[in-house]
Image: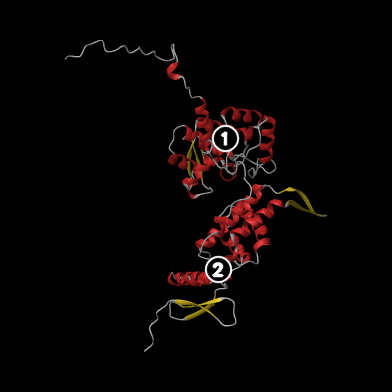
Amino acid sequence: MSRPITHDGRVVRRKGTRFWWMYYRERDGTRQRESTFTEDWNEANKKLRERLQARDGNILQVVRKGENLTFGEWADLFLENYSKPPIREPKTHVANCRAANHLKEAFATRRLVDVTGDEIEHYLRDRLRQRVRFKTSSGYVERGKLKPTTVHQELRVLRRMLNVAVRKELLSSNPCAHVEFPVAIKGLFRPHYVSWSEQQQIEFHAAAHLRNLVRIITETGLRVYKELLPMKKEQLDFVNAVVWIPDSKTPSGISELPLTKLALEAFRNQTAISGNGDFLFPSDETPTKHLKSVKTSWRNTLRRAGIPYFRIYDLRSTYATRVSAGGVADEWVTQMLRQGDSQVFKKYSQMKLQMKREALEKLNRQANEMTGTLCQKLPVNEGFGTVLAQ
């Protein structure tokens, strides 16, 4: 009769080695022996407990795979399986590939489980000291230093990659959670709110198609490059004042969108100048295709209007802020934005704080001391004029 097992595992120092070794059994009873790769007894026991928890959770094989996986291998797997369309947009995949190339230069040969928060912060500081490099026919040309927003984008991609690794249980935790970005980025994810007077100034200096585009986005909240520019005329229903969105960034974005009078007028004006093609915003070079970008015309329009540059996508944030400031509940604003996550609305309504500050500036601290027609003068209390009964 075999002896009963009294311990799940143990840590032993083998002769001729510096590291502690751990002994434990698999779910089927098979005896395993592995090095903990540490000389600290407490760290070795922690590694043993993690092994036993993975065994009991039936994820031991996945954990072992993660320990043998290099960062470069995981980056390639991430780009292939979690970055390409339809999981992510093509432009997002291009940005992920660009960031992954820089990340692999620093961590490609490192084991995925060995990447620490301190190493990530060291990488970020090195990147902030580097300069922009352009490849030309005569070699590389260096320009100014990298912008903090560019380096922060690489940190966001890295955080996303490691979050997926945590969900796949290749990592126990994301080391980016302990990383503090070395530089304070002013205005990051703070969309610009366009006032009505500023919008009228932009429309005055804009070309006809761009004027209609600005009015449509601020009245409907449509996404510029995914929904509005590829739009076809057949998607419009002028009789019922709705537009059909067949393809969007999120599943909730595929829906019918009601139109205001200003949006309906802008759509009619754009239809009148778009020609006989199918697209509402046809390309100047190829009328059978839609317009791909308005970045140049948008930048030139802002310069002529004397307005500092901001992204045209911020017009969508302006729409969300105006709807929210009009008293619409946040849940309804999220549905009107056609977002899949209600938390995203917080990013679009940042300017509500500024509008509250403007309201506080109108606070009248002498409202009760004013006389005349603006407020009613209260009589002076001289008593009730009666004698209480004894």
SS at circle 2: helix
Residue, far left:
390
Question: The N terminus is located in which quarter?
Answer: bottom left
Question: The C terminus is located in which quarter?
Answer: top left
Mark seen at residue 66:
2
Q: Residue at x 56, y 56 (%)?
A: 178
Residue 377 at x, y percent in the picture: 39, 13
Q: Is residue 39 above or below residue 272?
A: below
**Relative to 184, is 367 on the left or the right?**
left
Q: Residue at x 60, y 82 (%)?
A: 16
**Any part of residue 285 in sight:** yes
**Any part of residue 84 in sight:** no
**Relative to 328, is 221 on the left or the right?**
right
What's the amino acid at mark 1?
Answer: Tyr
Residue, far right:
138
For label 1, the residue is 193
Q: Residues within 10 Å of mark 1 (few under 14, many from 20)?
A: many
Image quadrant assignment for residue 110: bottom right
Residue 354 at x, y percent in the picture: 54, 33
Q: Is residue 51 above or below residue 122?
A: below
Q: Is residue 364 above or below residue 133?
A: above
